[in-house]
Image (cartoon, rainbow, N blue to C red):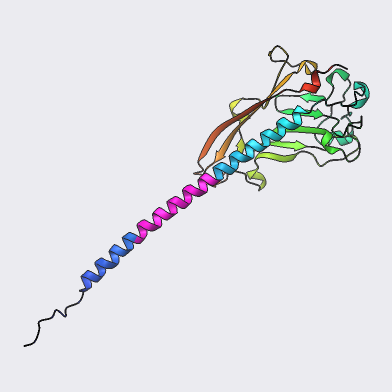
Amino acid sequence: MRALTNDRGFTLVEMLLAVLFGIIVMAGIGIAVQSVSRSGSSLERKVVAQQDVRAALEIMAMEIGMVSYNPTFASNSSLWSDLSSTAGQACGVNASVTNPTWKGIVEAGANSFTVEADINDDGVVGSNNEPNEVIRYVYVTTGGEQYITRCSCCTTSTSGSGGQPFLGDLSTSGRPRGVKVINNSLGIPVFEYFDASGAATASIPDIRRIEITLVVEIDETGFTYTTTGAQKRRLVYSTSVIPRNHGITY
């Protein structure tokens, strides 16, 4: 007797349904993988941006904290560099240190701060090959950009190329960043100065504490700030610097 068998196989409709099912499953997997990858990239950008801001703030605090460092107790009238020269103007400074009581603070503005320190203990600030003895930080808010520059060539004997980008977005210059310093947009000064009693002061000799505040906008999507659809997050970083050397009398 011959056994009964089913030789029909799959119909065309069944094959199409199987293919459709497979496409739906693969599409779901693809969307999930893309979402996880995008989330990971966003988190990585956020972490890197936050690290950049923290590192910048730490460097600023360290260098500003060294203001008026005078280990040899040299005369205030002869130690500090005169930045009214051409080399000093390379950093955008045209301020002569005519008042020795200012010591190592050449300017103390809301968005710019220039400090001097005798780092190599030779009794002279701003000699050849000593560019880091005079530092200037400036918050730039022109041309649609908002960023911090740092200049370390503000001396009378070392010519410089001006302030270099230090922190912030330079997208309109073809150098996009994931961080934008937005203090200006919110009316918050980068630098604030206080005397020994804790009161705000505009008198350079009376400065005993310097508050540095960086309000930043972090791009979480990988776009530049000129791209529509960029998602941003605002963060505030601040620190207080005690310029111990500036208050020493000698």
The picture places residue 21, in percent across and down from the top left corner, at 28, 63
Range covered by the magenta-colored residues: 26-44
Q: Nearer the viewer, residue 201 or 95?
A: 201
Asked if the magenta segment contains residue 31, the reply would be yes
Q: Is residue 57 left or right of residue 248?
A: left
The picture places residue 112, in percent across and down from the top left corner, at 73, 28
Asked if the magenta segment contains residue 139, the reply would be no
Q: Is the C terminus in the top left, top right, bottom left or bottom right quadrant?
A: top right
Q: Is the N terminus in the top left, top right, bottom left or bottom right quadrant?
A: bottom left
* Res 147 quadrant in image: top right
* Res 132 quadrant in image: top right
The picture places residue 222, in percent across and down from the top left corner, at 54, 47
Q: Residue furthest front?
A: 1
Q: Is residue 188 visible?
A: yes
The picture places residue 34, in percent across and down from the top left corner, at 44, 54
Q: Is residue 68 left or right of residue 4?
A: right
- Compared to 188, does 28 lie above or below? below
Q: Residue furthest left?
A: 1
Q: Nearer the viewer, residue 140 or 23?
A: 23
